[in-house]
Every structure is written in structure tokens, then in C-alpha cells.
């Protein structure tokens, strides 16, 4: 279970985690400022509409391409996929810094989604190169790096925008993405043999979807992602009702605090060995459902912050255990396709969840975005009972 930095696996984990940390900083540092870029471009009307279209365009193309890139990674390796994502998105960020109007920005965000997939490729690479006894621990550390990057990103993005302007910060983050794309080749770790190239990408994806165990994990992941997104469209409005005088400050705090607890919890959850994976998965989901429902009754910012912080521990568990179950439930030579299909499906969950949360809160009140989220997690909990515990020789972590 102990992993030394001086071992090949330890160096590999450190460098891949560093790449994930850098990439997540970039993703979370730029996204909040895209509406400001629209204003800087001179857009005068329908700014909320164009902002939502720009966000959706990236998610849509990313969801479409995720299974394809995953299947390709099984043939040509995960390192090339990380390099493709880092270098490709780095080039798109440079072009975005030079964009002139909202149409160009929309098209570039769609193009960015086509190249996306750095973090899924990194998780797949770690899963395929980890010893079985270190798998859960290693994925937990990568998840922690991602969470810390997500927390740091908005702060770093704000500083870069203040120093260089939004376009200048895009150029800086493009350079960071290029570094992230190169990092995997510094590991020196050889990937295990991939899938036979005689089978088409379509056949690889179809074979993945035929795996009943994987399909059930995908569906629970879809519901979990939808639940997480159901809250986001109305969270700022909830905070405005609770603390109208400091709404922006508290919104940033509420958004970031879940990342703090996720980062704290991830390494520890990855070390849990005494509880079967499926049992741990169910405990994380049902705990998350209860905490989400309680957030709908929050009467102050302090109570909401407290519940969001505790929820982060369960969020870390759902993410880590879900990824470990995928790694252990499919063919080791087809893991890229497994994670690719999974990320495509949860991208759909992102769109579905945010739409459901917005509709329910608009129809019944803001608290119902939390209640809708809790219901989706409860549905995921019941569905998870159909997932089998991986075979003992594969599941010792």
C-alpha cells in the first residue's frame, strides 16, 4: 500500500498528478471569466444566452468525442491522448485569446470540447499502470490533485486577468496546457499492451456498452453527475436570498468549499480497505443524498457552508469508488473505451441535471433544486444494488 516517490510507479503518479493539477487550474481559471470576455468583445444583448451556449458547446462536443478518444487510447496509448488534449487545447486557448466576436468564441469552445479529455486520459493511464493493491490509493491522489487545482483555479485566474487581462491570461494558460501535455512523457513508464487494432472504434464502444456491470456503473454515474449539476443553476440565487449584502463573496466560498473537503478526503478514501467497494459506493451515495436534501432546508449561509463542506467528503468517495469500479469491471485492454464512454455519458448527465434543477426550482421554488438532486442520488443508490462486487483477486485494494 505504501508508494515511494523513488519507485517508477511513484514517479509516474507524481507527474501525472502534477499534469492533472495544472490542467484543472486552467479549466477552472478561465471558465468564470468567459462572460466578461463576451462583454469585452462588445456584445450588448443576450449575454446570459450566449454564455450558456458557450458552456453547452464545450460540454456537447466533449461528450460526443469522449468515447471515441477513449477507444483510440486503447490502441495507441493514454500518453498520446494526454498530449493530444494538452497541446490541442493549448492551441485553442491561444486562438481564443485572438478571437474577435461571440461567434468565433462559440466555435472555439466547441473545438476545445473536441480536443478535451486530459483528466479522463490521466485517470485511465494511472489505472492501467498501477499495481492492483495501489489502484484505489493512486486514483484517490489524482482526484485530490484535481480538486486542489479546481480550488486554486479561480484565484489564479483572477490574478492573471488582473495582471495580463483576460486575453493575456488565456495565453498564459495555453502555455500551462502545453506543459501538461508534455509531462506524461517524462514518466518513463511503459503502458501495458493495448487492444488489437483489428477491431473498429465502433466495435470497441459497442463491446463496452454490452458489459452489464459497466453499464450499471455508467448509469449510477450519470445520475450522480446529474444530481451534482442540478444545484448549480440556482445556488447563487439561494445565497442571494440568505445573504443579499455579500452574495458574490459567499457564492465563491460555497462553490470552493466542496473542493477543499474533496481534496482532504480523497487520499484517505483511497486507502480504505476494510469495506467492500460496492458497499462503500452505496454509503457515499446515500450519505450524499441525505446531505443534499438537508441543504434545501438551510436557513443561513453558515449552515449551507457546513453542509456543502461535509458533502465534499461523500463527493470524493462517489468519484473515486466509481472510477475504481470501472477500472476493475472491464477488460484491462479496453479501459480507455470504458472511461471514454463513461465520460461521454456523464457529460449528458451534466446537461440533464442542470436543466432539471432549473425547471424544478422555477416551478416549485429554489429549494427544489436540492430536493431534485437528492432524489437523483437516491435513485442512483437503489440502482447501485445491481452492481456486483468485483472478484476478490481483482478487488483487494
Image: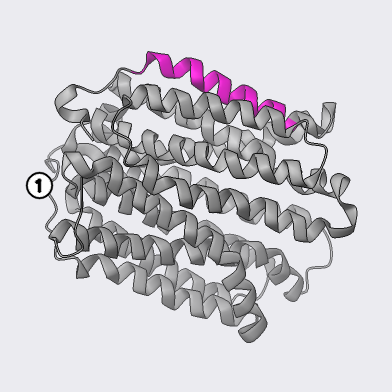
Q: What kind of element bears circle 1?
A: loop
- In front here: 289 or 50? 289
Kindly identify the residue that appears in the image at 28 percent across and 22 percent down.
211
Q: In the rendered image, which quarter is residue 388 located in?
A: top left
Residue 194: percent from the left, percent from the top?
A: 14, 45
Residue 215: percent from the left, percent from the top?
A: 36, 24
Q: How is the image coloured?
A: one colour
Left or right of 311 on screen, residue 3: left
User: Does 77 sit above or below residue 364?
Assistant: below
Q: Is residue 379 magenta?
A: yes
Left or right of 180 on screen, residue 96: right
> What stretch of residues is rendered in magenta?
369-387
Left or right of 9 on screen, residue 213: right
Q: Residue furthest bottom?
A: 163
Residue 251: percent from the left, percent from the top?
A: 74, 54
Q: In the rendered image, which quarter is residue 35 located in?
A: bottom right
- In front here: 220 or 263? 263
Residue 293: percent from the left, percent from the top?
A: 68, 27
User: Does 92 sit above or below residue 206?
Assistant: below
Left or right of 146 on screen, residue 204: left
Kindly identify the residue that appears in the image at 51 percent across and 22 percent down.
380
Q: Is residue 122 at all visible to an observer of this figure?
A: yes
Secondary structure predominantly adopted by residues drawn in magenta: helix
User: Does 276 sit above or below residue 127?
Assistant: above
Amino acid at each position: 500500500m505504501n508508494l515511494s516517490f523513488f519507485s517508477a510507479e511513484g514517479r509516474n503518479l507524481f507527474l501525472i498528478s502534477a499534469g492533472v493539477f495544472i490542467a484543472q487550474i486552467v479549466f477552472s481559471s478561465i471558465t468564470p471569466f468567459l462572460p466578461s470576455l463576451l462583454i469585452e468583445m462588445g456584445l450588448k444583448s443576450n449575454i446570459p444566452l450566449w454564455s450558456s451556449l458557450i458552456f453547452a458547446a464545450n460540454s456537447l462536443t466533449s461528450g460526443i468525442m469522449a468515447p471515441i478518444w477513449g477507444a483510440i487510447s486503447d490502441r495507441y496509448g493514454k500518453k498520446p491522448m494526454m498530449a493530444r488534449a494538452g497541446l490541442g487545447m493549448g492551441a485553442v486557448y491561444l486562438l481564443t485569446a485572438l478571437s474577435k466576436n461571440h461567434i468565433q468564441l462559440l466555435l472555439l469552445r466547441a473545438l476545445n470540447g473536441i480536443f478535451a479529455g486530459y483528466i479522463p486520459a490521466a485517470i485511465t493511464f494511472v489505472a492501467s499502470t498501477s499495481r492492483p493493491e495501489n489502484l484505489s490509493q493512486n486514483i484517490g491522489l489524482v482526484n485530490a490533485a484535481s480538486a486542489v487545482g479546481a480550488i486554486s483555479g479561480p484565484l489564479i485566474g483572477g490574478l492573471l486577468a488582473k495582471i495580463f487581462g483576460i486575453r493575456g491570461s488565456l495565453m498564459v494558460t495555453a502555455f500551462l496546457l502545453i506543459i501538461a501535455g508534455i509531462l506524461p512523457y517524462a514518466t518513463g513508464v511503459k503502458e501495458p499492451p493495448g487492444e488489437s487494432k483489428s477491431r473498429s472504434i465502433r466495435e470497441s464502444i459497442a463491446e463496452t456498452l454490452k458489459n452489464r456491470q459497466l453499464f450499471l456503473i455508467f448509469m449510477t454515474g450519470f445520475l450522480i453527475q446529474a444530481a451534482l449539476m442540478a444545484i448549480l443553476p440556482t445556488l447563487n440565487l439561494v445565497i442571494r436570498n440568505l445573504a443579499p449584502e455579500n452574495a458574490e463573496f459567499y457564492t465563491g466560498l460555497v462553490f470552493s468549499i466542496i473542493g477543499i473537503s474533496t481534496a482532504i478526503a480523497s487520499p484517505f478514501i483511497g486507502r480504505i480497505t476494510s469495506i467492500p467497494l460496492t458497499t462503500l459506493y452505496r454509503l457515499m451515495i446515500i450519505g450524499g443524498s441525505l446531505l443534499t436534501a438537508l441543504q434545501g432546508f438551510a436557513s443561513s449561509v453558515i449552515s449551507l457552508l457546513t453542509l456543502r463542506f461535509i458533502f465534499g467528503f461523500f463527493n470524493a468517495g462517489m468519484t473515486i469508488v466509481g472510477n475504481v469500479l470501472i477500472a476493475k469491471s472491464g477488460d484491462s485492454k479496453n479501459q480507455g473505451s470504458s472511461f471514454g464512454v463513461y465520460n461521454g455519458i456523464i457529460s449528458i448527465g451534466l446537461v440533464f441535471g442542470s436543466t432539471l434543477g432549473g425547471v424544478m426550482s422555477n416551478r416549485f421554488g429554489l429549494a427544489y433544486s436540492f430536493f431534485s438532486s437528492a432524489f437523483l442520488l437516491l435513485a442512483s443508490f437503489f440502482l447501485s444494488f445491481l452492481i456486483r462486487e468485483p472478484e476478490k483477486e481483482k478487488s483487494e485494494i
